[in-house]
Amino acid sequence: MRSALVVGTGLIGTSIALALTRRGIEVHLSDADEGAARTAASLGAGRTGRPPQPVDLCILAVPPARIGTMLAEAQREDWARVYTDVGSVKALVHGSAEEAGADLSRFIGGHPLAGRERSGPLAARADLFEGRPWVLTPGPTTSRDALNQALELVSLCGAVPVVMDTEEHDHAVALISHAPHLVAALMAARLENAREESVRISGTGIRDLTRIAGGAPELWEDILSANAPAIAEVLAAYAADLNEAVDALRALAGPDAEAAKRGASDLAELLRRGNAGHARIPGKHGAASASYTAVPVLISDRPGELARLFATAGSVGVNIEDVRIDHSQGREAGLVELLVDPAVADRLAADLAASGWRVQS
């Protein structure tokens, strides 16, 4: 690949452009919002405007509902040799492209599973896709050239290619991304009119659960509309489990001892299933999920404290697998939980305490 055209200079499009320019690819940028394209160019993502001749690859980083018609238009005007997209749904894209009369042999669907809570070109990062899955959905007529160009794009961005069927992809993202976003939004919506006293004591649990609810509503309206059937199917199953949990809790609070016993058993089974499902989420480097032990450390909210804590852990030969931070209410301090291999947790706690850190037991 020597040249590329990125159409749509939001977070994903600009991040792709930055990754490609970093690898020496000549990148052209196009956006209906010329200001966004100029901003992306100012970040070093490429040059604005359509290329004077067809590029090797055109990446359509526009909302899913627009990809099919834009692909057909781009092919009529000969923007590129082959084309891909980055839409988060695939069946709609393939179907609308076929209806618009696009040449599907020169197109392969794509979906990088990476993102941030922030949107727009200023949130873009060249390393956004490093180590992240990038799904490719070739159709029955997709050419080898299109597949190879897409694989090279994934490689240049540092991502990991995953080939899937369009329907399989849409169900998968409904399960692991789209439905969870709606559930997070529903939970966060409970806080909108909650009493201030309730919100003030929020901790890491509710913060982690609702983090993705901070995404741009306009973007998510497009995504949810495009994958509505698959999301509704997942949420229907979720609703059934939720109703079961409600019935179990009400039984536990009721006067019927037998019903309360059944309610406790039903809740235990839901929690067991939750543990089993959580254990299936890939862990570090895509390996099986591992169980870590938390070493809680109180630190002051001063510049350099976190780096100093990590340096101390490194100096005693302990690798930090993950970290959680909970800021104290009303004090310039916080609780940092260092997640480490259980075999070294006690030694790390002792070494940190010996170095003057306030380790909680």
Image: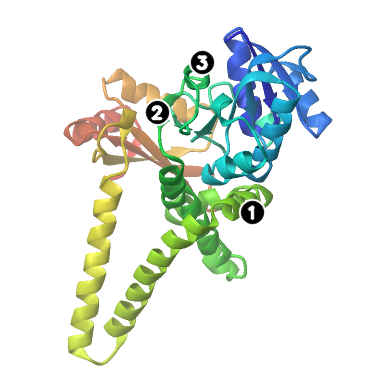
Report the disc number at residue 309.
2
Structural distance between the alpha carbons of marks 2 and 3: 35 Å
| Contact (Cβ within 8 Å) of mark 2 with mark 3 | no
Amino acid at circle 1: Glu
Question: Which amino acid, by three-letter code, is at mark 3?
Answer: Leu
Measure the C-alpha gap from mark 2 to mark 1: 42 Å
Of the two numbered discs 2 and 3 in the rendering, the one whose residue sits closer to the viewer: 3
Q: Amino acid at mark 2?
A: Leu
> Considering only vertical position in the picture, is 209 above or below 130?
below
Pick whichever of labels 2 and 1 is earlier in the sequence.
1
Q: Which residue is mark 1?
A: 221
- Asked whether residue 245 is in view, the answer is yes
Q: SS at mark 3? A: helix
Q: Residue 184, percent across and down?
A: 50, 57
At 69% from the left and 26% from the top, the residue drawn is 75
Where residue 133 appears, as percent x and y from the top left, is 43, 31
Q: Position of residue 3 (x, y in %)?
A: 65, 11
The circle on residue 156 is: 3
Residue at point 71% right, 21% down? 79
**How many discs mark residues in the rendered view?**
3
Q: Check disc 3: other Cα within 10 Å, few if <14, some if 14-19, many if 20+.
A: many
Work out how far the residue at label 3 is from the one at label 1, CA to CA, in angstroms.
30 Å
